[in-house]
């Protein structure tokens, strides 16, 4: 455990996972979109404490107590549910996109395809210097 001064909110990683699973089951039953902040409040912890658990601050690899997996999986489930709502047109499209960009690292992708062709007409009797001069005139 990296932070000896902090008291764990959960003493058993399996119990934490059961509580997280119960939250998602409740959201499914209510047909509501799960939220990470709501999960934290349901678990009786703050957003900051949840971030510490997510980063593995309370993981104890030696004993096999890995709490971070429960929160990483929860974050993936929340993102998936928002993605499904976006595709199905449920809820505010703009709001869901905003949330996914700011909380799930979604990004706009802009693709620019630039293609240009310059054709230079050179007379047969031009030498190389004259042809280069004609080309430069075309470029402006």
Image (cartoon, rainbow, N blue to C red):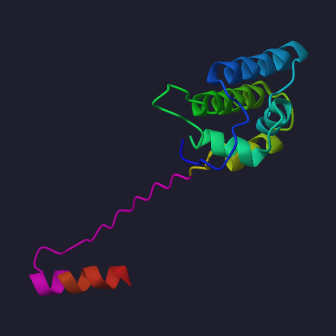
Is 127 one of the magenta-colored residues?
Answer: yes
Q: Residue furthest toward the right?
A: 30
Residue positioned 86% across, 38% down in the render: 92
Residue 69 shown left or right of residue 131 in the figure: right
Q: Would you say residue 100 is visible in this rendering?
A: no
Against 87, residue 115 (above or below) is below
Residue 114 occupies which quadrant of the picture?
Answer: bottom left
Count of marks, rendered view: 0
Q: Would you say residue 50 is visible in this rendering?
A: yes
Against 102, residue 136 (above or below) is below
Task: Pick the quarter of the image with the C terminus.
Answer: bottom left
Is 31 one of the magenta-colored residues?
Answer: no
- In the rendered structure, which segment of residues is drawn in magenta? 110-131
Provide the major secondary structure of the magenta segment: loop
Nearer to me, 58 or 36 = 58
Nearer to me, 121 or 10 = 10
Where residue 62 appears, as percent x and y from the top left, is 45, 30
Residue 127 occupies which quadrant of the picture?
Answer: bottom left
Task: Pick the quarter of the image with the N terminus.
Answer: top right
Residue positioned 73% across, 23% down in the render: 20
Against 117, residue 83 (above or below) is above
Nearer to me, 63 or 52 = 63
Residue 66 shown left or right of residue 92 in the figure: left
Residue 96 occupies which quadrant of the picture?
Answer: top right
Where residue 35 appears, as percent x and y from the top left, is 80, 34
């Amino acid at each position: 455990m990296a932070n000896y001064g902090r008291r764990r909110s959960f003493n058993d990683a399996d119990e934490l996972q059961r509580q997280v699973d119960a939250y998602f089951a409740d959201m499914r039953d209510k047909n509501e979109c799960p939220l990470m902040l709501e999960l934290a409040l349901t678990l009786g912890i703050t957003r900051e404490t949840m971030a510490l658990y997510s980063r593995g601050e309370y993981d104890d690899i030696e004993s096999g107590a890995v709490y971070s997996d429960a929160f990483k999986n929860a974050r993936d489930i929340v993102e998936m549910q928002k993605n499904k709502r976006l595709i199905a047109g449920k809820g505010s499209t703009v709001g869901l996109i905003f949330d996914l960009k700011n909380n799930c690292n979604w990004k706009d992708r802009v693709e620019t395809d630039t293609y240009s062709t310059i054709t230079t007409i050179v007379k047969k009797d031009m030498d190389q210097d004259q042809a280069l001069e004609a080309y430069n005139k075309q470029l402006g």
